[in-house]
Image (spheres, rainbow, N blue to C red):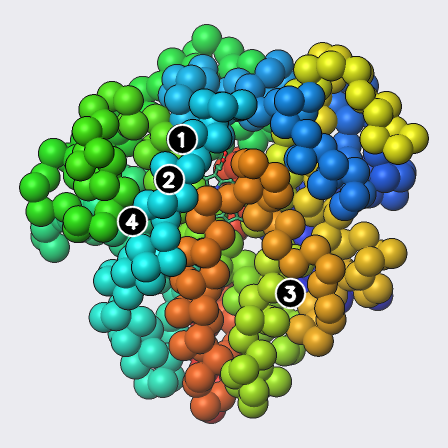
Amino acid sequence: MTAPETRADARLYFANRPFVHGFYAVTRRLGPVVRVPGIGTIVNDAEVARAILATPAVFTSSGPGSFGILITEVLGPRALINMDGAAHRNLKQELAEVFSPRYVAAVAGAAAGPRLAALDAALRAGKSVDFAAFMRDYGCAMACELIGLRLDPADEAAAFADIFHLATEIMAFAGTAPRRLSLAQSSAAKALAARLATHIAAGYARADAPPQSLTARLRDQGAAFETVRDMVTVVLVGAVELIVYGLPRALAVIIDSGSLPALQADPARLDAAIDEALRLTTPSNAILRSVAADHAIGRHRFRRGERVIIAFRNILRDPALFPGGDGFDMTRTNPLRRLVFGAGPHACLGAALTLAEMRQVLGVVAALPSPLAIGARARNRGKLYPGYTRLDVRMIE
Ligand code: HEM
């Protein structure tokens, strides 16, 4: 029988895009590498996926059929995730210096304090809290702190709502992984990106941006706004959407699986619970590559011009690696712990920050004296990543 946490998470996929959910569910049964005419080659095997991600000269992030080509169309060619080779390596190196552990700690510390205290107080008082709404505020605040966008308190709520709307609407165009956007889609996405860029430009122009922040550091290095805008947009979108949709899903699987009392009894298990929640929910469920030259990995042959879809959602539920893998089990050992953040040169730049934010927010829940029950939930539709738009939680007396 399917575990309750998996049933609840599957309903998110059905609400979001029923076809995509069905596609993963069917292709995962068909083998490690599955060719689907008109769509691409689905990779359901961890070793093949790692080999692909470690060979970026063959499996590119900018060729036909990749996610990068859509980003290039909307944002331009220097957005990091759509770059390959030396140019990508150099930009990533510069950014890795900015995303130092000290910086991540500073960001995680700055915007969170009063928000976490308010969450803790409301839950301890027995109030019902919409955790999805909490995450929209917290996630946007952290993302703005990260890129250096200081807002006046009076403008904050409206700016966060606008940033969240723009970030999720832009990414929604990539939801069915089209090979190209139509003219209408392309101009609509460009208009949204231009609006998002006005928020970033405001941060770039302000003298009081936190000196550690991404834009302040880039500006101090002499980078003109136009040269960093597209890459900062990608960082902002990742920091907003994956966090705001990812964390409520993580909390929901912990509660739905009945694991919260065990976590609260032993909060030292928080990191294990986070790893398991990321494995089961795979917030970024697949990534795309374009094959630049014929290539073989073991017995699997990839042909030039093909599109490859690395299905993290299937890989991280592979029954050979994760017995009972459709259920949440924070005692399991996960040999693919960080694969959910990708691997190779394009591995996620925000992994350390994501983990810091998860420890903060889920740490509040783990420290409560009683478990939480979930009340009303609502799910997004048509967005790139499935997620809750409402998730009411309340402490059980
Ligand atoms: C639940 C949270 C997150 C997950 C599961 C996730 C997952 C991923 C994955 C799988 C990739 C690899 C993409 C590829 O190889 O094509 C990636 C790349 C990236 N992520 Fe994340 N991410 C998360 C949060 C974040 C956050 C918070 C930020 C920003 C602070 C961020 C920024 C980026 C950037 C800039 C890249 C592109 C790196 C490159 O191309 O070199 N991500 N992410």
Mark 2 is on which residue type? Leu
How far apart are the two marked residues, 4 and 3, measured between alpha carbons?
26 Å
Which comes sooner in the sequence, label 4 or label 3? 4
Residue with the mark numbered 1: 91
Dot 1 lies on which element? helix
Kindly report which numbered mark, 3 or 1, lies closer to the viewer in this rendering.
1
In this view, the residue farthest toward the top is: 183
- Are dots 2 and 1 in contact, CB under 8 Å? yes
Mark 1 is on which residue type? Leu
Q: Residue at x 67, y 73 (%)?
A: 330
Q: Is residue 351 left or right of residue 295?
A: left
How far apart are the two marked residues, 2 and 1, measured between alpha carbons?
6 Å
Kindly report which numbered mark, 2 or 3, lies closer to the viewer in this rendering.
2
Question: Would you place residue 242 above or below residue 190 in this image?
Answer: below
Residue with the mark numbered 3: 276
Dot 2 lies on which element? helix
Q: Residue at x 71, y 63 (%)?
A: 334
Q: In x, y percent, where is residue 72?
A: 45, 18
Residue with the mark numbered 2: 95
Which comes sooner in the sequence, label 3 or label 1? 1
Q: Is residue 212 left or right of residue 104?
A: left
How far apart are the two marked residues, 2 and 3, measured between alpha carbons?
28 Å
- Are dots 4 and 2 in contact, CB under 8 Å? no
Which comes sooner in the sequence, label 4 or label 2? 2
Tell me the number on the disc at residue 146.
4
Dot 4 lies on which element? helix
Which comes sooner in the sequence, label 4 or label 1? 1
Which quadrant of the rendered structure holds the N terminus?
bottom right
